[in-house]
Amino acid sequence: MPFTIAIDGPAASGKGTIARALARHFGFAHLDTGLLYRAVGAMGGDPVAAARALVPSDLDRDDLRSAEAGQAASRVAAIPEVRAALIDFQRRFARTEPGAVLDGRDIGTVICPEAELKLYVTANDAVRARRRALELGDDEVRILGELRERDARDAARAVAPMRPAKDALLLDTSEMAIDEAVAHAIASAKEAGA
Ligand SMILES: Nc1ncnc2c1ncn2[C@@H]1O[C@H](COP(=O)(O)OP(=O)(O)O)[C@@H](O)[C@H]1O
Ligand SMILES: Nc1ccn([C@@H]2O[C@H](COP(=O)(O)OP(=O)(O)O)[C@@H](O)[C@H]2O)c(=O)n1
């Protein structure tokens, strides 16, 4: 049986950074599930048809990391048929041997409720905006507004809203350097049997 790690949390909280480091440390596969929604949003046209036709190479587009792509992702992510079309791919990925790390919004609650480890990664709004603004070379105030709008939409939607699974471990990285946050996550994974 593969070891599955589910990582959820709001925008720019550090999910991807932690997920990549965990995958590297344990030799697991990693899937940034946000890229699925970003790719669907970027395709334009009918999002349900785009989600049904999505192929892995669509995730390689180089325009998926922008704030605009994030907004488009969060709009298509509220459509139940879009989410349904992406479930099988994610669940299949989660069964990769010897293990898989998936990060997103609904991994611990909907995609992999049986995951061996569930982490819910947070950081305060100002810290998240600063980190993402640095990453994108964008304006911090504009990014703060964008993150808040997206978080509100992601938390309020009817299907698979962003929220911690009941048995998720909370990791607040507001005051942590990357190394420290990663060390906490590795320790939690070892405790869970990775
Ligand atoms: N603990 C941390 N301290 C400082 N910067 C961080 C930390 N965690 C992540 N970052 C940086 O913040 C940005 C957003 O992190 P990322 O892992 O992409 O977040 P998410 O996947 O939750 O959107 C990246 O530029 C990353 O290098
Ligand atoms: N499992 C997931 C992953 C992302 N998403 C949506 O996709 C958007 C982009 O996700 P992301 O993880 O790439 O965003 P960041 O946290 O990296 O900013 C989110 O705002 C959600 O609306 C989702 O609904 N479910």
Image: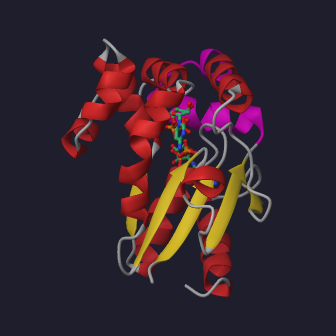
Q: From the viewer's side, name the closer residue of 9 and 130.
A: 9
The answer to whether one can see residue 64 in this image is: no
Q: Look at the image and give the residue range highlighted in magenta.
A: 124-144
Q: From the viewer's side, name the closer residue of 136 and 15.
A: 15
The residue drawn where x is 43% and y is 33% is 37
In this picture, residue 60 sits left or right of residue 183: left
Q: Is residue 131 magenta?
A: yes
| Dominant secondary structure, magenta | helix
The answer to whether one can see residue 174 in this image is: yes
Q: From the viewer's side, name the closer residue of 91 and 138.
A: 91
Q: Is residue 22 magenta?
A: no
Q: Is residue 98 above or below residue 66?
A: below
In this picture, residue 43 sits left or right of residue 165: left
Where residue 159 appears, x then y in whole percent? Answer: 64, 33
Q: Quadrant of residue 28?
A: bottom left
Where residue 156 appears, x then y in whole percent? Answer: 74, 26
Where residue 163 appears, x then y in whole percent? Answer: 74, 44
The residue sitting at the left extreme is 57
The quarter of the rendered structure image containing the C terminus is bottom right
In this picture, residue 29 sits left or right of residue 115: left
The residue drawn where x is 31% and y is 11% is 45
The residue drawn where x is 66% and y is 46% is 9
